[in-house]
């Protein structure tokens, strides 16, 4: 969020002065927006968590209802997940001290790849060190000179950066309006028929909680001979049969060529994955700098994700509970008159406030009342779409959810967001 603020403020300063400073660090000196927000007592970022029990955390010495975490199934506090991490450290140590390509592969990596491929319904899976890095392992590796990336305008920042890397390697990037299938076809129809094409989209969009119209994208891909990559960071463990993701939700696993995801959300760990055919995985495994030159996921991270996968397989009711919890808040806030965006069957419930200062004030008052949410403000979101992004866990209790709705209502009326 502040990266966007920094860039915008720096650019505005340079435009006013009519010159770009010669000192590389001048932009840092000129960046004051964060300090101004802090001075106003409205800074909502980088708050340290002192203890974490899942739906309840300790912050600033107080118990707070966590309504801003991506810990969708509540597994970060699960005893089996924590035990698996501890046992892995005892057996393998704290790190692998090398890349997967050389000395950094342990048997747990291979086991998680095999079991996750089976769970998702793909031929093969490849682990990547972080979720953010995963898009960079795929897009610049696969899309090269004379080939095209067709990307949704609201795709996650990791995809935007991966697209930029591919452009640096002379690939072409075109974007289509968010979730706009007609515009997608308009864009792709103008590209050379004989060129390689990769349509890239989030499965569940991280800001709004919208679900992609995957059936229509599959139809477009088949019509124009394109491949599909879906970022399921907010979909794995959340949507689809037993949490198997966007392709599963629509019965299109065989039609979505590549699914990428992360272990930092439903899987209660850290790292990313790529799911595809054996040939695609084999090519990326031997061609991607993001894999070859990065230290491999740590034993504790992999063991945690494995334990989480076992729990998800054995307890699909957690996914159902997550949906019910999110829907309870979504419906409750709508009943109060809030402008709520997003769709059922996701863990994200976003509330449009439409004003930067009011969004920051709302966030502060929620925190003071015992609820943590995320503030999304300009220029990270377009003008008029400043919002409170809330997200839920399968482990939230009804009293937590109803308390969130109650406090939202009190503050919303106080600030004039609802009547």
Image (spheres, rainbow, N blue to C red):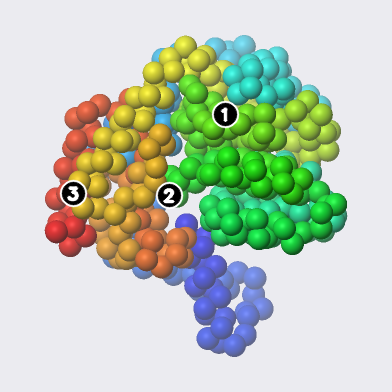
Q: Residue at x 79, y 39 (%)?
A: 288
In-image side of 287 versus 238 (left or right): right
* Residue 276, label in figure: none
Dot 1: few (<14), some (14–19), or many (≥20) neighbours within 10 Å? some
Residue 317 at what x, y percent from top left? Answer: 39, 18
- Rendering coords of residue 49 (x, y %): 36, 38
Q: Residue at x 45, y 50 (%)?
A: 207
Q: Residues within 10 Å of mark 3 (few under 14, many from 20)?
A: some
Rendered location of residue 399, percent (x, y)? 19, 30
Q: Are marks 1 and 2 in contact (CB under 8 Å)?
A: no
- For the question of whether residue 384 can be seen, the reply is yes
Snapshot quadrant of residue 225: top right
Q: CA distance from mark 1 to mark 2?
A: 23 Å
Left or right: where 288 falls relative to 395: right
Left or right of 4? Residue 135 is right
Say which residue appears at 67% left-offset and 60% top-offset.
187
Task: Residue under label 1, please give it.
Answer: 251
Q: Does dot 2 land on a helix, a strand or a loop? A: loop
The label number, if any, that marks residue 208 in the structure image: 2
* Residue placed under numbered mark 3 in the picture: 336
Task: Kindly state the secondary structure of the residue where label 1 is placed.
Answer: loop
Q: Nearer the viewer, residue 64 or 218?
A: 218
């Amino acid at each position: 969020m502040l990266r966007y603020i920094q860039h915008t403020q720096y650019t505005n300063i340079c435009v006013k002065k009519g010159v770009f400073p010669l000192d590389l660090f001048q932009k840092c000196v000129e960046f004051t927006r964060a300090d101004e927000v802090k001075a106003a007592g409205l800074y909502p970022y980088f708050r340290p968590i002192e203890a974490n029990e899942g739906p309840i955390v300790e912050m600033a010495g107080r118990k707070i209802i966590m309504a801003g975490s991506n810990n969708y199934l509540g597994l970060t506090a699960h005893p089996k997940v924590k035990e698996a991490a501890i046992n892995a450290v005892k057996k393998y140590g704290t790190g692998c001290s090398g890349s997967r390509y050389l000395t950094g592969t342990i048997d747990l990596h291979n086991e998680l790849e095999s079991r996750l491929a089976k769970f998702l319904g793909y031929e093969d899976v490849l682990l990547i060190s972080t979720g953010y890095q995963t898009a960079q392992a795929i897009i610049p590796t696969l899309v090269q000179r004379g080939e095209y990336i067709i990307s949704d305008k609201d795709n996650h920042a990791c995809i935007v950066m991966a697209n930029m890397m591919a452009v640096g390697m002379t690939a072409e990037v075109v974007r289509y309006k968010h979730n706009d299938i007609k515009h997608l076809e308009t864009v792709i129809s103008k590209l050379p028929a004989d060129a390689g094409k990769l349509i890239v989209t989030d499965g569940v969009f991280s800001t709004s909680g919208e679900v992609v119209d995957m059936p229509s994208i599959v139809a477009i891909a088949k019509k124009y001979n394109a491949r599909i990559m879906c970022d399921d960071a907010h979909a794995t463990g959340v949507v689809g049969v037993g949490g198997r993701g966007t392709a599963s939700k629509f019965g299109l696993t065989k039609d979505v060529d590549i699914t990428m995801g992360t272990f930092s959300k439903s899987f209660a760990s850290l790292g990313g994955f790529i799911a595809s055919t054996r040939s695609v995985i084999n090519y990326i495994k031997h061609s991607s700098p993001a894999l070859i030159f990065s230290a491999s996921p740590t034993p504790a991270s992999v063991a945690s994700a494995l334990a989480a996968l076992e729990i998800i397989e054995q307890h699909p009711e957690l996914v159902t509970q997550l949906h019910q919890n999110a829907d309870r808040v979504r419906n409750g806030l709508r009943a109060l008159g809030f402008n709520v965006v997003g769709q059922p069957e996701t863990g994200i419930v976003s509330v449009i406030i439409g004003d930067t200062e009011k969004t920051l004030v709302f966030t502060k008052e929620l925190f003071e009342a015992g609820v943590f949410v995320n503030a999304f403000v300009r220029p990270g979101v377009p003008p008029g779409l400043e919002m409170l992004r809330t997200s839920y866990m399968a482990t939230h209790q009804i009293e937590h959810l109803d308390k969130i709705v109650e406090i939202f209502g009190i503050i919303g009326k106080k600030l004039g967001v609802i009547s």
